[in-house]
Image: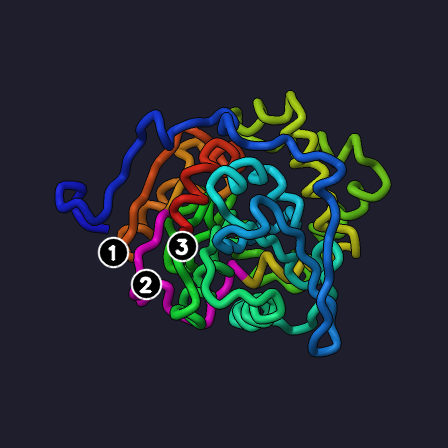
Amino acid sequence: MTDPSDGDSHEQATPDVSRSSPDSDSDSGSDSMGAHTTVEFDGRTLAYAEYGDPDGTPVFGFHGVLGSRLTWALFDRVARRAGVRLIAPERPGFGYSSFQPGRSLLDWPDDVGTLADRLGVERFGVVGFSAGGPHALACAHAVPDRLRGLALASSVTPPSTHGHADPFNYAFLSATRLVPGFSQTAFQAAAWLATHSPAQFRASIVGTAAAPDRALFDDAVGDHLVRDAAEAFRQGARGPARDMPLVGEDWGFDAHGLDRPVTVFHGTADETVDVEMARAFAEDLGDCDLYLTDGAHYSTLVGNASALVDAAL
């Protein structure tokens, strides 16, 4: 990341992008937005949903480790107004998508490319949220000619930045990589709560959220986020349990070597991915616009829906 004065990359917190409250255009999500479509290939099912303008410019949205296609229902109105066809695939083991044993981060661009081909989409933008960030960067590495814009919100950062994590998150990241069965055990507990005790599942999410995120759970947006998190466990814990170590270990490619602009939104109050990790990653990326908000993990996503969609075009 270069000096702000050169006009190429900068940290910024302005009224346009520094909001912890929901974007005025963001949706709260509705039951009708839970629909999904599936495609079959390689003996697997890949599920996705579409939001926004069906005739608009294609943009793919990649959810977090506690998420699904439903994440992007919150962007439906924004996408429609921007003339964007927002395509929200579920990674293997999430929602209705089949689990894929032994998958790597670089398997995801193949899935996205196949889905795009089936949908008649040649080029597309990408928005990655949280653990969806590394998957978006994998697409930028593997299929750069197909990408338009690339935007990240509250993104997980590469292992090279883990030294900037706070002690708790550093220990958690290390455990997912080094302790056999740690990720599976942790997510099995969450999956059980999502299925058998929705109230406790909600309490576990709200109780561990940073203050700007907790404010979201007082209205319909929060209800939708909890529903979205529970959908990650529709098939049990295997999808999230594979996803977490996948983005915490070596990615299999050098994200710093990407020859394209990247727009990053990150909250200074994010307790899931420390803001210093985002700063270090943006510095290494070079051609990066880093927007620091006063939000946290979810609130940075929800509060900057319009800006994220625009950056992906």
Looking at the image, which is closer to me, 261 or 163? 261
Q: Which residues are magenta?
A: 247-263
Reply yes or no: does residue 89 show up in magenta.
no
Please provide percent x and percent y for residue 133. Answer: 48, 54
Residue depicted at x 32% and y 43%: 290
Marks 3 and 1 in Cβ contact (< 8 Å):
no
Reply yes or no: does residue 254 show up in magenta.
yes
For label 1, the crowd category at 10 Å Cα-Cα, with few meaning under 14, some 14 to 19 and many 20 or more, is: many
Residue depicted at x 54% and y 70%: 113
For label 3, the crowd category at 10 Å Cα-Cα, with few meaning under 14, some 14 to 19 and many 20 or more, is: many
- For this orientation, the residue located farthest to the bottom is 42
Q: Earlier in the sequence, mark 2 or mark 3?
A: 3
Label 2 secondary element: helix
Q: Three-letter amino acid code at disc 3?
A: Leu
Q: Which mark is residue 256?
A: 2
Q: Three-letter amino acid code at disc 2?
A: His
Label 3 secondary element: strand
Please provide percent x and percent y for residue 203. Answer: 71, 30
Relative to 296, is 182 above or below? below
Nearer to us: label 2 or label 3: 3
- For this orientation, the residue located farthest to the front is 55
Which residue matches tag 1? 286
Q: Earlier in the sequence, mark 1 or mark 2?
A: 2
Which residue matches tag 3? 150
